[in-house]
Image (cartoon, rainbow, N blue to C red):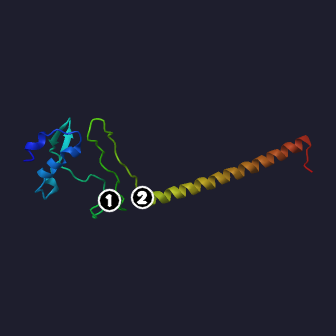
């Protein structure tokens, strides 16, 4: 049986695939699925329950291709950590920020205010400097031709 064959030696998780297939041959519910991984050179049956782990802002597509899309419900769009199968693997996470429509509009409005404010400051500065230059020219008796 598959339980007896879990002492098989391995160098990667793929070496344990046949054991996993045999072990899960009659499984009809994901909660009964058993994963077999390669740990320190031996195929090990885990006691973990595997499930899709992502935020409410991500929706799984039912097309059999393991594809996902973001939805517009305003939920967080994140996925569970990425775990490697050996000691040297990188441990990380995936993140996709999805901002609300209102947040996007507020950023545009803030940008317009910054642009208008900058234009007003530049206009006032040039007006002030023209007057200052004119006063200085008058004091030294300079008149442009």
Q: Which residue appears farthest toward the bottom when viewing the image?
A: 63
Q: Is mark 1 on a helix, strand or loop?
A: loop
Disc on res. 67: 1
User: Which residue is located at x 35 percent, y 54 percent?
Assistant: 77
Closer-to-camera residue (140/67): 67
Point out residue 13 in the picture as x, y percentages from the top left corner: 22, 44
Identify the image quadrant of residue 28: bottom left
Q: How crowded is mark 1: few (under 14 residues within 10 Å), some or many (20 or more)?
A: few
Point out residue 10 in the picture as x, y percentages from the top left corner: 19, 39
The span from disc 1 to disc 2 (Cα, nearest Å) is 23 Å
Identify the image quadrant of residue 135: top right
Which one is in front in this view, the residue at disc 1 or the one at disc 2?
A: 1
Tag 2 or tag 1, which sits nearer the N-term? 1
User: Which residue is located at x 12 percent, y 42 percent?
Assistant: 6
Q: What element carries label 2?
A: loop
Closer-to-camera residue (24/101): 24
User: Which residue is located at x 91 percent, y 44 percent?
Assistant: 142
Point out residue 143 in the picture as x, y percentages from the top left corner: 91, 47
User: Which residue is located at x 14 percent, y 40 percent?
Assistant: 8
Point out residue 7 in the picture as x, y percentages from the top left corner: 12, 39
Q: Disc 2 designates what residue?
A: 100
In the visual, does 94 lie left or right of 129?
A: left
């Amino acid at each position: 049986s598959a339980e007896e064959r879990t002492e098989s030696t391995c160098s990667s998780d793929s070496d344990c695939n046949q054991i996993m297939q045999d072990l899960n041959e009659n499984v009809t519910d994901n909660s009964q699925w058993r994963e077999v991984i390669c740990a320190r050179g031996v195929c090990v049956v885990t006691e973990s329950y595997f499930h899709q782990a992502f935020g409410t802002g991500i929706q799984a597509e039912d097309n059999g291709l393991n594809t996902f899309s973001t939805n517009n419900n305003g939920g967080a769009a994140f996925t569970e950590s990425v775990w490697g199968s050996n000691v040297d693997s990188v441990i990380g996470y995936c993140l996709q920020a999805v901002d609300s429509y209102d947040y996007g509009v507020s950023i545009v409005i803030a940008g317009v205010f910054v642009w208008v404010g900058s234009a007003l400051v530049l206009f006032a500065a040039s007006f002030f400097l023209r007057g200052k230059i004119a006063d200085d020219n008058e004091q030294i008796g300079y008149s442009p031709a």
